[in-house]
Image (cartoon, rainbow, N blue to C red):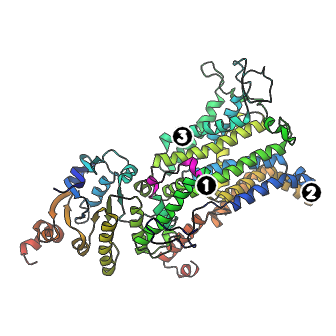
Amino acid sequence: MTELLLDAQQIRVEFGGLVAVNDVDFTIPVGSIVALIGPNGAGKTTFFNVLTGLYKPTAGTVMFDSKAVSGRAPHEIAGMGLARTFQNIRLFGTMTAAENVMVAMHPHLKGGLWQTIFGTPGQRREEHEAVDTAHDLIDFCGVRGDPDDFAKNLSYGDQRRLEVARALALKPKLLLLDEPTAGMNPQESDDFIAFVRKVRDEKQLTVLLIEHDMKVVMGVSERITVLEYGSKIAEGTGEQIRTDERVIEAYLGKAATEGASL
Amino acid sequence: MTAVTANGTKAAPGGWRRNYTSYAQPLVFAIVGLLIPTLVTNISTLEDRWMPLTTMVLCAIFVLFTLGLNIVVGYAGLLDLGYVAFFLFGAYTAAWLMSDFFFQIDPGIHLFDGTVTDKTPGINISFWLVLPIAALVAALAGIIIGAPTLRLKSDYLALVTLGFGEILPQVFRNGESVKGFNLSNGTKGISPINSLDMGWLSWTGVVASKVNVFDYTTRYYIIYALCVMFVLVSLRLRDGKLGRAWLAIREDELAASLMGVPLMRTKLWAYGVGAAAGGIGGAFYAVSLGGVNVDTFNFQFSVNVLCMVILGGMANVYGCILGAVILTWVNYTGMTEVGNAINNTFGTSIEMPHYQFMLFGSVLVLMMLFRRDGILPAARSKHSRELDEAIEARATGDETAEATA
């Protein structure tokens, strides 16, 4: 059996009476690209929020890199190497693109209050290198705009790419992408598939994405997990998912499977 | 310098803004401030009427307060309506450690203090040691107040800090007998406080070893040096890791925490550094006046300092300085002198200072209507608001906005 980077067992999230995630088991092997799909409201983002520490699961355990995640604050989990992007872009609008990326270097920069006030040589060197790294990451992710322009001024596509650059600045082991191709045209989506592969190979990390665009999902993921109403209804390769009756039902309705006219 | 990056792929072009603090502006600020007393004392109408050194010392004290609050409100975006608490802690720390108030301690504790005789009871520590102690006490107070409250979001935090700002002066007002122990001497205040000890500089022959009650020039230079120091601290922090984290929290707390920024610790640093400036300012204020009076520490103070930050330009160090100087000057000298000038010219008898709050309020309203980002806005905030307005206008179909944006 391959080594697991993330191992979530029996995750359950309840909001009052509503069960948003219903006893889901979910694992991610090291170095893979996996996708989490499901109709709107299936609990995908909720599940993401459990992994990143925003929500405390009602029950269940999450092991990341053989360490327990539950009970840790989001910034600690981020520091452990779990980085994410957001469904609705959440960049720091009035900071420059480079500064946005540098914020995510926080856990790796050592210069504390006094080093900063006195501008020690070590702190200056570190800042210098941080600027360079930020520019490199911005380049790597293909942001076309000016790295010193405010994030707010960048084009939509650039903002999406900048979010990935910012997440990469955390030096993550696992990169979570929440609907990364939302609002992209087919050409851009194709480019994105290639980009995700490049990130995985060059940065040697593992990728989990939530996605609605089936072409992207089928094109990039090595394994797909399908959620519906908070429960896992299917898991497997693209081919297996494509032909799974319950998945077709969930997406297209019961009539589709009954009519067998697909 | 062109830096080749770790993987050697690319050197940084010169156009990229390096995150380095520029020293040109602080230097200009320092030189201008140093020249002012010489200038003023040579022009008698300035010194006697328009710019007395007493007012200028107060201006500088408020510059320090404003810079401190700017870190909390401007940089980190935490609305603090109880800044007076740190002012109070600084002032009382100086009063406790630089007087015979604790006369029970006899023979007194003396540390590098050349201003009183060795027989004086109480704690007598040199002002220069009291400064860092006051900064520390205020910073600790900030952290203690902040720890339970900084989890709250904007409006709630503002209310809780307001509460603290009201409670603390009340504690000191009633602190005449805490289980029989006189902590603060209540409404009578603590006075006199030992004077500024300049003994360590007396060899230069420029200053007296003990700063005279009327020696506002020396006082001015001391507080001004502290201001310059804090300008540098503010700029350095803004451009470093901590400053970026503050900005990120101000922009989007949730995203910041998911990018590895520890929210509580980062906010506490902002509170601590801001409070330290308040503590230093408070200690200087107490020593400069030679005593503390609990009535000084009121809500009005917190509001005034906040107004200075907003009026001058939130998150912009130089804007804050300008805001502090203008408002302090108007409060202590401007209104009276402008009134006198009007009365002398037109033969009227208007009591200008009576209209202070009316004018103050009107200016604030006008500023918020026409120049929301302050006199000297921070590049970020001005830009951001203009962009927001343009986007909003465009969304509502306003085509003129596109032309002007």
Residue position for label 3: B143
Residue B133 horizontal/vertical position (percent)? 64, 35
Magenta stretch bounds: A104-116
- Contact check, label 2 and label 3, Cβ < 8 Å: no
Instruction: Name the kind of residue labelled 2 in the image.
Output: Asn
Magenta-colored stretch includes residue A114: yes
> Residue B64 at x, y = what percent?
69, 48
Question: What residue sits 71% from the left and 53% below the top?
Answer: B324
- From the image, state whether disc 3 or disc 1 is nearer to you: 1
Q: Contact, CB < 8 Å: mark 2 with mark 1?
A: no
Alpha carbon of mark 2 to alpha carbon of mark 3: how far?
A: 52 Å
How many labels sit on residues? 3
Left or right position of A128 against B335: left
Q: Residue at x 48, y 54 (%)?
A: A109
2 vs 3, front mark: 3
Residue B236, disc: 1
The kind of residue on which mark 3 rests is: Ile
Q: Is residue B230 above or below residue A161?
A: above
Whether labels 2 and 3 share one chain: yes
